[in-house]
Image (cartoon, coloured by chain):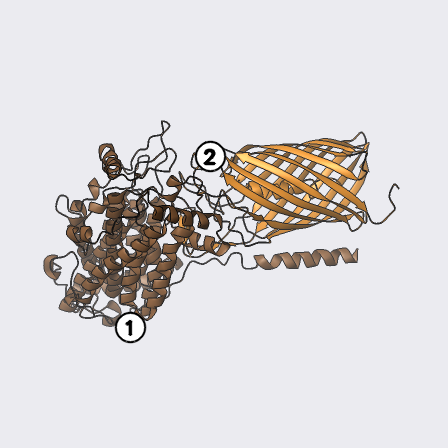
Chain colours: A orange, B brown
Amino acid sequence: MFIILFLLASRVSGQTITDHLMMPKKDFCTGFLYTHEQWKDYWEGAEKRDNQNIGIITTSQIMWVGNYGLSDKINLIAMLPYVKTSASGGTLTGLEGIQDLTLAIKYALVEKEISSGTFTAFAILSGSTPLTNYTPDYLPLSIGMASTTVSPRLTVSYKLSSGWYALASGAYVWRSNVSLDRPSYFTDGNIYFTNQVWMPNQFAGFYSFGYNKNALQVELNLTQQNTLGGGDIRKQDMPFVSNRMNAMRLGVLGMYYLPKPKNLALRAQVSYTLNGLNVGQSVAVMAGFLYTFHFGKKENQ
Amino acid sequence: MKKFYIIVLTLVVLVAIPFSCKDIISSENLFPLTPGNVDANAGTWKSISLVSNSQIAVPAPAATNSTAYLAELASIKDVQSKLTSDQKNSIAYWSVGGVLRWNQFFRKLVAQFNLPPVPNADGSYSFADAENPFGNPQFPFSNPPYAARAYSYVSVAMYDALKAAWYYKYQYNRPSPYVVDNDIQALMPKVDLPSYPSEEATMSGAAAEMLKVLFPVAVEEITKMAADQRNAVLWSGKATASDIAAGLNLGKAVAGFLTAAGTGRFRTDGMGASIGTPALWQQLADDTKAKEETPWVSLDAPARPPMLPYFGKVKAWNLSPAQIIAERPAPPPSTSSEQMKQELAEVKSFANNLTRSQLAIVHKWADGVGTYTPPGHWNDIAEEYIRDARFSEVRAARAFALLNMAIHDAGVACWDTKYFYFNPRPSQLDPTIKTSTGIPNFPAYTSGHSTFSAAAAVVLSYLFQNSTHYFDSQAREASISRLYGAIHYRADIELGFSHGTKIGSHTVTFAQTDGAN
């Protein structure tokens, strides 16, 4: 899992925090998304290998998502996952628990008709923080990184009236120090006599191409995580929370608003890690539902 | 719109708070050392490895009014007149006490080299080879027994060398440069101690020469560390070039005495035979089966050869081979006994019901792959006590030597016990037991953590008698952490702990009569 859990938050949020859709004023969209993720091979530094002492790492998560239209131009978004990890090989136990709460505010900065399409730019500010005192020092079986993050994000999209669209989004992720349960650790060539770990910041990119008209959305997307610093996992060493964890993931997403019951959407995504550093090469399958409440107006309008 | 800006501003402020301290990570917890007592009589204390103080000759220094010495003073003044910020940083770095710095440095080297060999494609493993240290795997794999022995040799070499330095210091009584010449500044804390031979240079020679043998791949880093210490003491006005040269020679000679080919203790203590051979490993399993017990098997995948099965035959510092056998704990519960079933059930219960605070204890003491090991953890604990006691360099070196001799002896005696009984880990007898830390690649009975920690706590309790309760509670926590982690039975930790207590007392007996009290 390494980063992957961390990525999950940004990936699923990718469909609220990074997408080109806005909830209209006083609409509230909420639901649960289940993700099942597995990997056997991982990158130890840049070298790809497997490890029979962990076998296959499985991470499952159930995430609650909520997105409220404060106005047509401002959305408030919240996400909270429950995560469970396990290893098929070796003796190490898995862990589970409530992970990090993410809160975001999304603002439609520019909306402009250009030829036969609409150009939109969004400014998003999101933050996340662990809600429980889980350990980040048990990778690859920790349920998260236990860092508090803040990320300003800019997203631009262009959508044709036919429904085809393209989108690019980038965020800078500030990450707070994390605390370990031990008084000393070795990483990136140095020993530290403290339980505090400095976490390198990250760049999070999201790029998608898809079709969205009426009740249907389908898209192909790339999720990029670049950690701006940190050490590699050394040969036969354990991964460490501040490692330089990079990943490029390819995903296929589908979402469909059912004709009945109204306002209920089903959503599914499959994604695969194309390449990375200090992360597992995972395959993730996500499925879930979202329901929209219209608080501002009557149904069927 | 106004509302929006207020929301954004509030969010920014709220989320910025946790980041305001982000870059203040300092692992510096030492401060400039002014010893409470210079220990002028340290030359009369008992050596550990040297036969006598004068075993390594240090020639008389030139007089302080000689041309050669005056030239040395002039060069210090010249350097001090144009110190760079890097040079000042070096002086500050070493002002906290060289013995503490070197101890931190070898904890770093142990962590750096504490990586097991990667399995070969066919599932076999290659061994780290001292004759081919840069190969794959690198030499050494500084696992806990290797580390225990390494910490002890470096600490003993530093102590014996410093003790001899003290003897010569008071034989020759040459003052520090800043005492001889008022124009020379004292940029390290002033210590009322003769400066020939320089204690910093002495320890740099002893530590570096030992470490180069123990961690040959790090030769460049070790050499730089040692040179930096000697430069810092010269720039600080505390020692001249001849004080430093004499100390360096003395320190190197002590390490050379320990590591002399064919005769040095380091070469003849049995470490070379501690790995054994496949036939010997099979013999361990066969002997255990002959006693109608289930023999240990490696739970690494692919199965890994046992870690240093003959480390129990390595020479101890303060126990004879006969004492090691005589004090070996009684047999563990038979693998087929009712008691073993109960102990296994207890392990499983911890594995399945572990609390967050118990997990924190497991991880606090895990000290596994890529760390400074349990012996390093106890050096880490000792550091702040030695710092706060404001020990002279020679007394600080003695404290680490005593601590690390006891830890080494604990390692030897524990490994003797482990491979004598060859007892399986809980997860071997019940594969449904999942552990919350890595499972060590050696037999269960008795617990290394418990033995190391109890022995270390006994020595530290002797040295710092006001903190006995703290050391004991830490050792007990280290011990129980292995049951919480589901990698040891209760018998392993309880008998290991009492065994470790006995082993530590042998070093205390030495300390009580070494003349330093």
Given the image, what chain letter belongs to the residue carrying mark 1? B
Give the left or right position of residue A287, taking residue B497 as reference: right
Residue neighbourhood size for the residue with mark 1, other residues' Cα within 10 Å, grouped as few (<14), some (14–19), many (≥20): few
Residue A242 locus on image (x, y percent): 49, 47
Give the left or right position of residue A195, taking residue B209 as reference: right
Residue A225 locus on image (x, y percent): 57, 40
- Outermost residue, top direction? B122
Residue lying at 58% horizontally and 58% vertically, measured from the top left? B18
Q: Residue B314 — which label?
A: none
Q: Is residue A12 above or below residue B381?
A: above
Residue lying at 30% horizontally and 33% vertically, measured from the top left? B126
Residue type, label 2 = Gly
SS type, badge 1: loop
Q: Write down the quadrant of residue B103 in the picture.
A: bottom left
Residue tagged by mark 1?
Answer: B36
- Alpha carbons under labels 2 and 1: distance apart: 56 Å
Confirm whether residue B256 shows in the render. Answer: no
Q: Nearer the viewer, residue B44 or A97?
A: A97
Confirm whether residue B283 shows in the render. Answer: yes
Q: Is residue A7 above or below residue B496?
A: above
Q: Residue A55 — which label?
A: 2
Residue B427 locus on image (x, y percent): 40, 42
Q: Nearer the viewer, residue A59 or A147?
A: A59
